[in-house]
Image: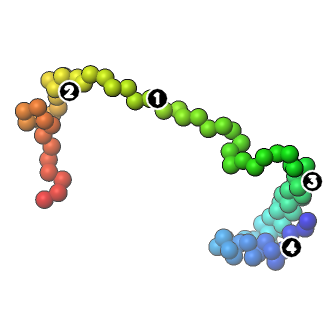
């Protein structure tokens, strides 16, 4: 399927892209070749292939949450620049 110069210009206008004459010619050829590849793919028999949203099975890479004992407050606050009892002391962000 041949993509015309006008179709390339229409696509460029939709994308808000300015093209030179050399780019229009090159893109016309490239888009034509791309559409030819899709025409070949349309000839593949997919009647027995179930539709899918993912080509690769999804699997979670997150580990399960495990309840563990907490660290003692003294260990947690050991490197705190400022502390107030067993809490971190920070500057006020909002008035």
- In the picture provided, is 72 more to the left or to the right than 47? left
The residue carrying pointer 1 sits among few (fewer than 14), some (14 to 19) or many (20 or more) residues within 10 Å by Cα, namely few
Residue at the spot of label 2: 76
Q: How is the image coloured?
A: rainbow
Dot 3 falls on a residue whose secondary structure is loop
Distance, label 4 to label 3, CA atoms, is 24 Å
Badge 4 marks a residue whose secondary structure is loop
Q: Is residue 26 visible?
A: no
Residue where numbered disc 1 is placed: 63
Which quarter of the rendering shows the C terminus? Answer: bottom left
Rendered view: 28 above or below 76: below
**Marks 4, 2: nearer the viewer:** 2
Label located before the other in sequence (4 or 2): 4
Judge left or right: residue 89 versus residue 27. left
Query: What is the quadrant of the N terminus in the image?
Result: bottom right
Query: Residue 62 at what x, y percent from top left?
Result: 48, 32
Q: Indicate which disc residue 43 carries.
A: 3
Which badge, 4 or 1, comes first in the chain's sequence? 4
Question: Quick check: 1 above or below 5?
Answer: above
Residue 88: quarter of image: top left
Q: Position of residue 67 (x, y in %)?
A: 33, 26
Question: Compared with residue 74, is residue 25 higher up or lower down, i.e. above or below?
Answer: below
Question: Marks 4/2: CA distance?
Answer: 68 Å
The mark nearer the N terminus, 3 or 1, is 3
């Amino acid at each position: 399927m041949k993509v015309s110069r006008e179709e390339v210009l229409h696509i460029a206008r939709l994308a808000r892209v300015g093209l030179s004459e050399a780019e229009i010619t090159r893109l016309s050829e490239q888009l034509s070749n791309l559409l030819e590849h899709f025409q070949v793919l349309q000839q593949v028999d997919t009647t027995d292939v179930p539709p899918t949203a993912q080509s690769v099975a999804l699997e979670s890479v997150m580990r399960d949450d495990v309840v563990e004992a907490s660290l003692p407050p003294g260990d947690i606050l050991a490197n705190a620049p400022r502390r107030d009892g067993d809490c971190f002391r920070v500057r006020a962000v909002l008035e």
